[in-house]
Amino acid sequence: MNEQGMSDQTVAEHPSHFWEKPVYILAVETSCDETSVSIVRDGEEILTNVVSSQIETHQRFGGVVPEVASRKHVESITWILAEALEQAGLRPEQLSAIAVTQGPGLVGSLLVGVVAAKAFACALELPLIGVHHIAGHIYANQLVHKLEYPLMALVVSGGHTELVFVESEGRFRIIGQTRDDAAGEAYDKVARALKLPYPGGPHIDRLAHEATDAVALPRAWLEPDSYDFSFSGLKSAVLAVLNQANMKGVALEPSAVARGFQDSVIDVLVEKALRAVEAFGAKQLLLAGGVAANKGLRARLEARCSEAGVPLLAPPLSLCTDNAAMIAAAAFLKYRRGQFAPFDMKAEPLLKLEAWSV
């Protein structure tokens, strides 16, 4: 039996209206360089989603500095918690549970969120729910779409590039992942080589759309039956093209390099995702993660999914990057089953997605 006096099976089999009053989950997200607090009702309705970005702080370094990120979280977390409650128009005693990103992420950043969530949950005597960051990205789609299982999720972010088969609600199986650089990481490295600001993804995407030509670059398909990805070789190929042009005194259009790079990344992501959908009999393809905001990727996926007759679900741009609303959406899966975390829960920078499954 759980804290509401219901068995896990009973909770799982009933929809959110099983409870006489709404379920308000306050969630905290501090896995990298965004400090965010959100309150979501019944796992679907966002009441507030406060996000404080550190992009300007880290731009001078060309990337996220872990120690700086964790210090910024410490400075921000208290007032963001207060602002979230004020925006939602709720009193703390109206909350049903406190959720927090347990991992993966930067350990110092994760610790700030975990400690804050524990303190809040303990003070209010509320259940605590630890959430996997990638589960959050996947279930960000639940905030705007109706999910149908089984489904396939293409997760593309700065630290992750994965194909995740979700056979039923909250049951994850990674069938493909990057063997080296994540797609977002490759975008940032290529942007740095082109002397573009951090984060590089939006700038590469913009240049690619402006280009009238594209530099020819390789596609890393790997083994014929593999759903894995590899972008390190592509990054090296871009650097080689730039170095050769520099040695020959040839001026390369940055937009042509950006388009060649982006075309290569998108070709592999899209074709492997569509192949996985067919092989696993998925009813939907979900796009998730920060790179899900990439216009080129979204347009190509929409076109290919339309051709294949596969529904494509993607969150709005505001829910693609790290935010706490997605953490609350994923936490609701655990809440319904009474699967709460102990108060000695630790931040886990290498937390495995399959291990988090409900």
Image: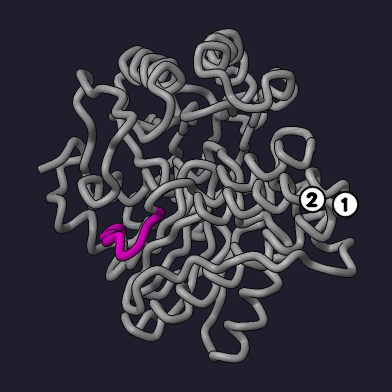
Which is more N-terminal, label 2 or label 1?
2
Q: Secondary structure at mark 2?
A: helix
Q: Name the residue carrying label 1.
A: 250
Magenta span includes 238? no
Reply above or below: 187 against 211: above
Q: Amino acid at mark 2?
A: Ala
Q: How far is the residue under mark 1 from the one under mark 2?
A: 5 Å
Neighbours of disc 1 within 10 Å: few (<14), some (14-19), many (20+)? few
Reply above or below: 227 against 171: below
Residue 262 horizontal side relative to residue 66, left or right: right
User: Residue 245: which disc?
Assistant: 2
Residue 179 horizontal side relative to residue 311, left or right: left
Q: Which residues are magenta?
A: 170-178
- What x and y, as percent, mark residue 152? 40, 70
Q: Quadrant of residue 197?
A: top right
- What x and y, as percent, mark residue 146? 49, 69
Which residue is painted at 59% across and 50% down in the image? 235
